[in-house]
């Protein structure tokens, strides 16, 4: 049992059965011909302490963390990488001889998806982010590191935006402006956007007939629209943007990239660039099969 766990990574969360992570990581381990496995473990927040204790005792080499434990895991770790600390969320844990360190690879996933596209920060166009949860924090960190100077942030709860403003402004020279959800402000802004990022769950299966944007006709062909939602792969927002001629980027690309970034941390090596396309295609096929 202990020996098996020493070769087994996992993702913890609650619920967790729906996770695509085993599909991704088991495929990667097989492609790299490594004797490693990856599984899901349902861990409600009140059982985190016990889970971490067991992993330490049995030598589990690492794990991913998802909702609702991305913040709750932090006090149980020996060290948290500065970037994960800044975002306030850990999605990857590595166990190095009993020392547990937490990382956040969502920023890598977001940045590498943008880098694969033709988008680059311009001084003229507006950058809008919808949502002010954990994913939005990774998005803002990624944008700041790519040289974006101003982001307009929309959320249902203004206090959440103010907290992000407070946390990020003391760390970078990025200006975060509060978008007003009322007064059809978003409608006006959309016509001038360079980049729109959906970091809310709006449009996610099983409510895939929803879009966070009520006036898609304002989206210009010069815009780039990035939806972090990965199920469905092409959300209603992305379909709306595509029909306007805009460049669209899918959450599945980011999901694949953040998973490979976790593997690079665990395996302590850079993975071949050619692996990305194979993994993306594999997970895409799996999703089609499961539909
Ligand atoms: P979260 O912590 O629940 O944050 C979502 C935020 O969006 C909340 O503040 C929510 O407010 C707000 N919101 C909901 N509807 C809105 C609307 N119409 N307009 C503006 N704001 C709205 O979730 P998260 O962890 O940040 O994740 C967000 C999405 O990103 C999820 O779909 C997740 O699956 C996806 N994600 C994808 C990847 C990837 O690799 N592709 C990685 C991370 C996350 P309320 O709480 O008041 O509803």
Image (tube, helix red, strand yellow):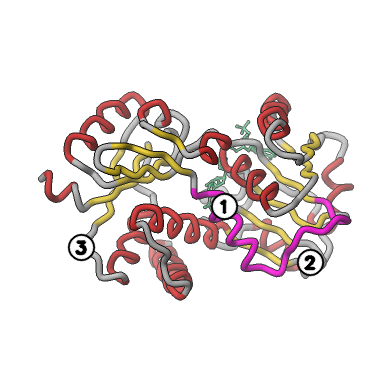
Q: Name the residue under label 1.
A: 229
Q: Nearer the viewer, mark 2 or mark 3?
A: 3
Q: Nearer the viewer, residue 203 or 61?
A: 61
Q: How many marks?
A: 3
Give the mark nearer the N terminus: 3 vs 1. 3
Q: In which quarter of the image is the C terminus?
A: bottom left
Real-space CA distance between mark 3 and mark 1, rounded to the nearest whole angstrom: 32 Å
Q: In the rendered image, is residue 127 in sight?
A: yes
Pick the residue in front: 228 or 87.
87
Crowd band around label 1 with a 10 angstrom C-alpha radius: few (<14), some (14–19), many (20+): many
**What span is in magenta?**
105-126
Q: Is mark 1 on a helix, strand or loop?
A: loop
The residue indicated by pointer 2 is 244
Q: Mark 2 or 1 closer to N-term?
A: 1
Q: Where residue 284 sits in the image (x, y, percent)?
A: 46, 67
The image quadrant that residue 2 belongs to is top left
The quadrant where residue 102 appears? top left
């Amino acid at each position: 049992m202990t020996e098996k766990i020493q070769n087994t990574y996992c993702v913890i969360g609650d619920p967790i059965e729906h996770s695509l992570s085993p599909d991704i990581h088991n495929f990667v381990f097989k492609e790299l011909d490594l004797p490693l496995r990856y599984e899901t473990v349902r861990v409600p927040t009140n059982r985190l302490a016990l889970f971490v204790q067991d992993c330490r005792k049995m030598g589990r080499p690492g794990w991913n963390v998802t909702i609702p434990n991305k913040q709750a895991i932090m006090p149980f770790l020996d060290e948290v990488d500065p970037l994960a600390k800044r975002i306030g969320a850990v999605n990857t844990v590595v166990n190095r001889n009993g020392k547990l360190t937490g990382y956040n690879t969502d920023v890598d996933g977001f940045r590498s998806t943008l880098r694969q596209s033709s988008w680059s920060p311009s001084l003229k166009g507006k950058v809008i982010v919808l949502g002010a949860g954990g994913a939005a924090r990774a998005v803002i960190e990624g944008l700041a590191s790519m040289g974006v100077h101003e982001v307009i942030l929309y959320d249902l709860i203004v206090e959440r935006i103010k907290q992000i403003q407070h946390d990020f402004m003391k760390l970078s020279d990025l200006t975060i402006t509060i978008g007003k959800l009322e007064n059809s402000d978003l409608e006006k802004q959309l016509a001038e956007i360079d980049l729109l990022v959906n970091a809310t769950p709006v449009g996610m299966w099983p409510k895939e007939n929803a879009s966070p944007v009520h006036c898609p006709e304002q989206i210009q062909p010069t815009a780039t629209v990035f939806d972090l939602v990965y199920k469905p792969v092409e959300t209603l927002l992305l379909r709306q943007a595509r029909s306007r001629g805009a460049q669209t980027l899918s959450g599945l690309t980011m999901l694949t990239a953040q998973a490979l970034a976790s593997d690079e941390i665990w395996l302590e090596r850079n993975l071949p660039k050619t692996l990305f396309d194979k993994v993306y295609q594999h997970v895409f096929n799996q999703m089609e099969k499961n539909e």
